[in-house]
Amino acid sequence: MITDKYGQQIYDEQDLCNLYLSDPNIRLKNVLVSDPISFDPNLNLDHIPKIIQYTVSDQTIDDFDSSNRQNWFIPDAYKDFDIAKFVLEQCASEPELQRAGEELILYQDRNMFMLLRYLKYLVDTMRSNKVVWGVGRGSSVSSFVLYLIGVHKINSLYYDLSITEFLK
């Protein structure tokens, strides 16, 4: 398997054989293949993914990134979720409301509300599946909004951490 400049994984026949031999119950939705001639694209078996011919694109990495930036694979309920309202409802005091409001403006200026919605979905999914994750890591702990969403457990307001450490 190779990875192209867009981060897509491209398989050849040997790669697919090895994949299925390592786990016969593997479930893949779509597979990009480098040599589609050796595959029958009309196969319609439940345990075999759809084979898609890989084609080299003349699209630049920036164009590819721009065209895929808004493709968030989350339920529609989260795509339309009012994340700002949710965050502000989590605040218990005026200083918390002030800090959350300031951060939300910074997130909005950077067009990062979909990221916040995705993180809310991720946290909800992990909680519902009883997944344990860390207390906090790196500069993300300086975001009070991420604390309110539940991404980490460090109250940046309590420790007087500046949001500029995270949103550089």
Image (cartoon, grey):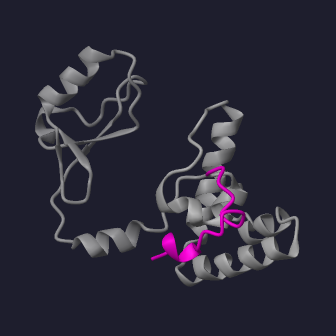
Q: Position of residue 145 (x, y in %)?
A: 67, 65
| Relative side of 55 to 128, left or right | left
| Relative side of 89 to 43, left or right | right
Residue 120 painted magenta: no
| Relative side of 1 to 129, left or right | left
Please give the count of numbered marks on the rendered protein. Answer: 0
Question: In which quadrant will I find the C terminus?
Answer: bottom left
Front in this rendered view, residue 17 or 110: 110
Residue at 64% across / 51% down in the picture?
A: 121
Q: Would you place residue 30 above or below residue 153 in this image?
A: above
Question: In which quadrant will I find the N terminus?
Answer: top left
Q: Position of residue 54 (x, y in %)?
A: 20, 50
Please, what is the dominant secondary structure of the magenta stretch? loop
Quadrant hosting residue 116: bottom right
Q: Would you place residue 70 above or below residue 123 in this image?
A: below
| Residue bounds of the magenta highlight | 152-168
Q: Position of residue 103 (x, y in %)?
A: 65, 76
Residue at 12% across / 32% down in the picture?
A: 38
Q: Would you place residue 55 above or below residue 69 in this image?
A: above
Residue at 88% across / 70% down in the picture?
A: 93
Quadrant hosting residue 6: bottom left
Residue 157 painted magenta: yes
Q: Residue furthest front?
A: 159
| Relative side of 151 to 61, left or right | right
Quadrant hosting residue 98: bottom right
Is residue 75 visible to the viewer in this orientation of the structure?
Answer: no
Q: Position of residue 158 (x, y in %)?
A: 72, 63
Residue at 19% across / 21% down in the picture?
A: 18
Front in this rendered view, residue 16 or 62: 62
Is residue 42 visible to the viewer in this orientation of the structure?
Answer: yes
